[in-house]
Image (cartoon, rainbow, N blue to C red):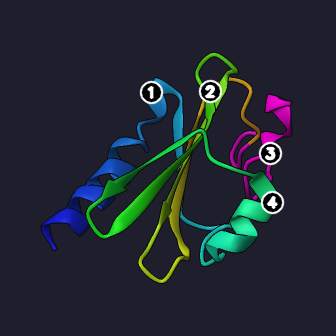
């Protein structure tokens, strides 16, 4: 339970709009299984365990777009957040999910 709260705290900290990070709770990614996520966005740049969640990190600060995706133990997307001027995310252009094509 402690680790789950830590993962949720991570997403809450990522919601600070003053730093340019946007947290997303809705959209097409929530509930998506990890295999579909991998087919859509490819291999993450890095990953780490956050208690009961696996944090997948896509993009980079150098490329101008970072996307953090939390996957639960059932291998479904539980939450995601974006940061960077080149990220197309909900709230910036109305899309329900990030467009990582800007990283190509």
Mark 3 — residue? 99
**Element at label 1:** helix
Lateral position of residue 32 relative to residue 99, left or right = left
| Residue at 45%, 27% in the rendered image | 18
Q: CA distance from mark 4 to mark 3?
A: 10 Å
Quadrant location of residue 62? top right
Ranked by sequence position, the earlier of labels 2 and 3 is 2
Q: Are marks 2 and 1 in contact (CB under 8 Å)?
A: no
**Element at label 3:** loop
Q: CA distance from mark 2 to mark 1?
A: 12 Å
**Element at label 4:** helix
Mark 1 — residue? 18
Which residues are the magenta region? 89-104
Rendering coords of residue 37 (x, y %): 70, 65
Lateral position of residue 1 relative to residue 95, left or right = left
Q: Quadrant of the N terminus?
A: bottom left
Nearer the observer: mark 3 or 1; the answer is 3
Predominant secondary structure, magenta span = loop
Mark 4 — residue? 40
User: Is residue 92 one of those drawn in magenta?
Assistant: yes
- The single residue placed furthest to the bottom in the displayed view is 74
Task: In this rendered view, identify the residue nearer to me: 26 or 35.
Answer: 35
Lateral position of residue 4 relative to residue 22, left or right = left
Height in image: 38 above or below 17? below
Mark 2 — residue? 84
Rendering coords of residue 104 (x, y %): 86, 30
Ranked by sequence position, the earlier of labels 1 and 4 is 1
Nearer the observer: mark 1 or 4; the answer is 4
Mark 1: few/some/many CA within 10 Å (<14, 14-19, 20+): few
């Amino acid at each position: 339970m402690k680790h789950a709260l830590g993962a949720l705290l991570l997403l809450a900290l990522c919601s600070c709009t003053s730093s340019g990070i946007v947290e997303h709770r809705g959209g097409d990614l929530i509930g998506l299984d990890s295999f579909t996520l991998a087919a859509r966005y490819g291999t993450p740049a890095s990953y780490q365990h956050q208690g009961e969640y696996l944090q997948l990190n896509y993009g980079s600060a150098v490329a101008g777009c970072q996307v953090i995706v939390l996957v639960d133990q059932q291998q479904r997307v539980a939450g995601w957040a974006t940061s960077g001027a080149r990220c197309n995310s909900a709230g910036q252009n109305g899309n329900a999910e990030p467009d990582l094509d800007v990283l190509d």
